[in-house]
Structure formats: structure tokens, C-alpha cells
Image (tube, rainbow, N blue to C red):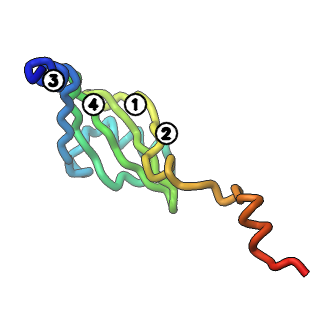
Amino acid sequence: MFAFVMIMVALNAQTRTAVKVNDLPKAITENLTSAHQGWIAAEAFKVDTKGVMTYEVLAKKGSSETMLVYDKEGKYLKMEPTKMAANTPSKHTTSASANEHAKPKK
């Protein structure tokens, strides 16, 4: 059983290393300023997943944030929502039962 767990861990191995934003490949910083205007790189990570190297850049614009993913040469791959954005409830959702109890009935 232990060997099976170790094999599964090895198959799903991912190494995520923090990188200084200033040390990102030029192609990434150029893409950020041209294709994602107004977004600022706040944090960056070099990710090795089963030998495939990518960069993840946490970008912020005002109170919004997103994760931009690039290949090892700095080619833009995709934008992913951050956990914070995914877990933040919408300002427009309200519970009917909460509203019913907010004001006492006369």
C-alpha cells in the first residue's frame, strides 16, 4: 500500500518555486503590459509538473486578481481564477430568509 501511495505522489508531483517578478522572462512582462493592460504582477512562481515547466503570475488590478499561466518560453497559455475570487460571494446574492428576518414584522 505504501509503495502505491508513493507511486501516486510521484505521478502527480508538482514543484512550485517562488520567482521574483523582476526575474520573469521578458516575453511574460511584455505580454502582461500589452495584452493585460492595467494588471500588475504581484507574485510569480515557476512550476514543474511532471517535467513540464510553466510560470504562474498572480496579477492584480484594483481589488481583482487572477492567475496568468505561461509556458517556459513565456508564451501566454491561459488565465485562471484565483482561489480568493472563486471563494468570494457575489455582492448581489442575498438570502430571502435573511431578508425576511432583517426587519421585524408589524
Front position among marks 1 and 3? 3
**Image quadrant where residue 57 sits:** top left
Taking 4 as reference, is 33 above or below it? below
Q: Which residue is mark 1?
A: 76
| Residue 32 percent coordinates (x, y) | 41, 43
Which secondary structure, mark 4? strand
**Image quadrant where residue 6 sits:** top left
Q: CA distance from mark 3 to mark 4?
A: 26 Å
Front position among marks 2 and 3? 3
What numbered label is drawn on residue 35?
Answer: 2
Amino acid tagged 3: Val
| Residue 2 percent coordinates (x, y) | 9, 23
Q: Which residue is mark 3?
A: 5
Disc with the residue nearer the chain's start (1 vs 4): 4
Q: Which residue is mark 4?
A: 54
- Report whether 47 appears left or right of 91: left
Which secondary structure, mark 3? helix
Q: Residue at x 28, y 36 (%)?
A: 55
Quarter occupied by the N terminus: top left
Is there CB contact under 8 Å for labels 2 and 3? no
- Report whether 84 appears left or right of 5: right
Which secondary structure, mark 2? helix
Amino acid tagged 1: Tyr
Taking 62 as reference, is 78 above or below it? above
Q: Residue at x 8, y 19 (%)?
A: 3
Q: Residue at x 23, y 34 (%)?
A: 47
- Report whether 54 appears left or right of 41: left
Dot 1 crowding, Cα within 10 Å, few <14, some 14–19, many 20+:
some
